[in-house]
Amino acid sequence: MSKPVRSLQIRHVDAGSCNGCEQELTALTGRDYDMQRYGLDIVASPRHADAMLVTGPVTDTMARSVERVWQAISVPKIRIAFGDCAAGCGFSQDSYASHGGLNDPDLTIAGCPPEPGKALSLLRAWMASHDTHGMTSVEVESNSKKIG
Amino acid sequence: MTTTWKHQNQLHKDSGHELLTLTANRRGKLTSVWLDPDDHRQSFLDLDLVDGSFPSLAASLPETAWDEREIHDLFGYIPLGHPDPRPLIRTPRWPKDFLPLRSAQLSPGWLEVEPDLPALQVEGDGVTIMKVGPTHAGIIESGHFVFSIIGENVLHLDAHLFQNHRGIEALLEGKTVGEVSPLVTRICAADSVSNQTNWASAVEQLAGFIPSERLLLNRIILLEAERVLSHLNDLAQIPAGVGYQVAHQRALAMKELWQRGLQSLFGHRFLFETVHPGSAVSAPADAVSEIVHAVRRHWVPWRQVVMGHHGFTNRMRGVGTTPLDQVIRMGAQGVTSRAAGKEFDARQSIPWYGEVFEGPVIRTSGDVLARFELRLDEVEASLRIIEKAARMTYKTPFQDQPFTVPEDIDGRAVAFSESPHGLNVHDVSLSQGRVSRYHVRAATYRNWPLVAQTVAGNAVADFPLINKSFELCYSCTDR
Ligand code: SF4
């Protein structure tokens, strides 16, 4: 029996953004978009999250932190690239300090920054078209290692 | 040479001048640029390196401490006698001989070690170390903070920033004039128009182009619209820092209203790519007044509710205080400095603001409350400036001034503006139509060291509130 994903708790990681993406993400928590109505929320710990949402081109200084946050989230889980920088088509992806975006995103929300209304509908469309068991292809064992 | 360098810089500081930039180039030269706020004159001081090093100014001019560490990290020039010569931007992952602004090749690649540097901590009985970041429990930019605390009180805060360092200055080198705007626009979403305006002014200066009054008015409208946007954001975040949700949500809603207005009038919710050399996006004056009125309808009752909430205003009073002498010593800028009584606003020193600028808004208590109230007054002033400038565009004739960038454009120009965060400076060198050096000195860069100093002596629980009252963006500091 497959059920659509009804709630997605998101851990945000800034990996070198210009803060435009952050501001639009914050707008989603405001009353005009109110993402909580749809089971979407930003959570304070990766332990509470179903998704990691990354903004920015993944700077070298943040690359390890991004992977650590990912490891700390329990399965099933997904990776979201928010904005052109994280999607690998931003302006600074070729600089020496940048890793050129998030690897293997399950969902890419393009835009510089993504328009919040559009971002919300993409998130909802993803939830409606995926089932709770198939969120990710990550093996359960890979999460057994505790990373501090 | 050494003594004159120190002496000359000190002389400018003692005369009340503002340090615009202190930076280097790959030919082994250091330059500091000072602004005299009274006659708007810029003074350039040069120093040639001796054996790859230069005498540090940081001990007597603490505002230069970060600049000198940055020069060391990116150029490899050594500041002799620097009181705190730890790396600032560089991490242990950078190969030793990699100096991005001197030899732009990253080879053999990043070293496989952790990026963290040892923090400065207090040791002793009862001292606890609390590490926060670089990732945070909310929608916040990345930064790593190491607190030394005793009980509830912060003894010392060591802020490790530059997680958002994208190497933008190196990225800009070699770009043609036409390629720069999309990059400069995205250094920081909160100060985008200010960055775009600096770039445009620098190119225009070097090309000998005099912008028309109408064009300058359009730029003023965009700069002030950005200030309203950024201040609304900060005014929404400060109440959120103490859980005052009603004020937070209503301010966010005003910000959304404003952004929709900006989108419809100027084509972008953050005004990206609205100012270019020789041009600026414009909108009809009536339409501009309309969005100003729409926001005011929500603003007036919101301000009354928030300032009438004694629990909230008391929570901000006396917390996170920055004394005026410290503000001046550290060369702090913008809201932070004016809230402590420093009477400097870069708009005074920009002749084309003319009479539309009403003069700086000042508070004297230097606490969270002062920074909050100062933003309230600045939003109202900016809305008035926008209306006034929009009305004036009717009276100024529209001259179509075709601007073509001379192919062999050459030279160095230092351009600045008052971003929502304060004095924002670009030091631009062009050679044969391409960027040979591009240095960005954001206001927040001068203010971050002050945040760390301000937090010491306050309670740990005050940190979110104090930090939000400065609301310094990381991205333009880190670049
Ligand atoms: S995608 Fe655009 S808005 Fe988002 S971080 Fe990158 S430059 Fe900024």
Image (cartoon, coloured by chain):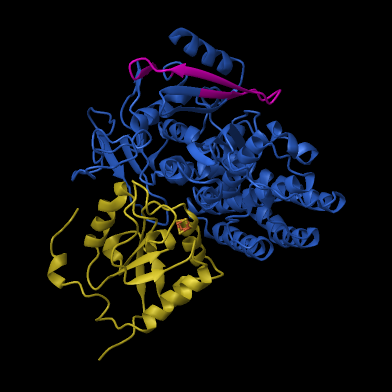
Chain colours: A yellow, B blue
* Residue found 73% across the figure and 58% down from its top: B292
* Residue found 28% across the figure and 34% down from its top: B119
Residue B339 shows in the view = no
Residues in magenta?
A: B32-57
Q: Is residue B136 above or below residue A136?
A: above
Residue B332 shows in the view = yes
Q: Position of residue B370 (x, y in %)?
A: 60, 38
Count of labels in the image:
0
Q: Is residue A10 above or below residue B409?
A: below
Q: Quadrant of residue B334?
A: top right
Q: Position of residue B273 (x, y in %)?
A: 59, 55
Quadrant location of the C terminus of chain B in the rendered image: top left
Q: Quadrant of residue B101?
A: top left
Q: Position of residue B69 (x, y in %)?
A: 37, 28
B258 vs B245, left or right, is right
Q: Considering depth in this image, is A60 or A30 the residue closer to the camera?
A: A60
B445 vs B203, left or right, is left
Q: Considering depth in this image, is B40 or B28 the residue closer to the camera?
A: B28
* Residue found 69% across the figure and 31% down from its top: B349
* Residue found 70% across the figure and 40% down from its top: B209
Q: Position of residue B400 (x, y in %)?
A: 77, 52
Task: Tell whether position B38 is magenta.
Answer: yes
Task: Tell whether position B144 is magenta.
Answer: no
Q: Given the current orientation, which residue lies at the most extreme bottom position?
A: A1
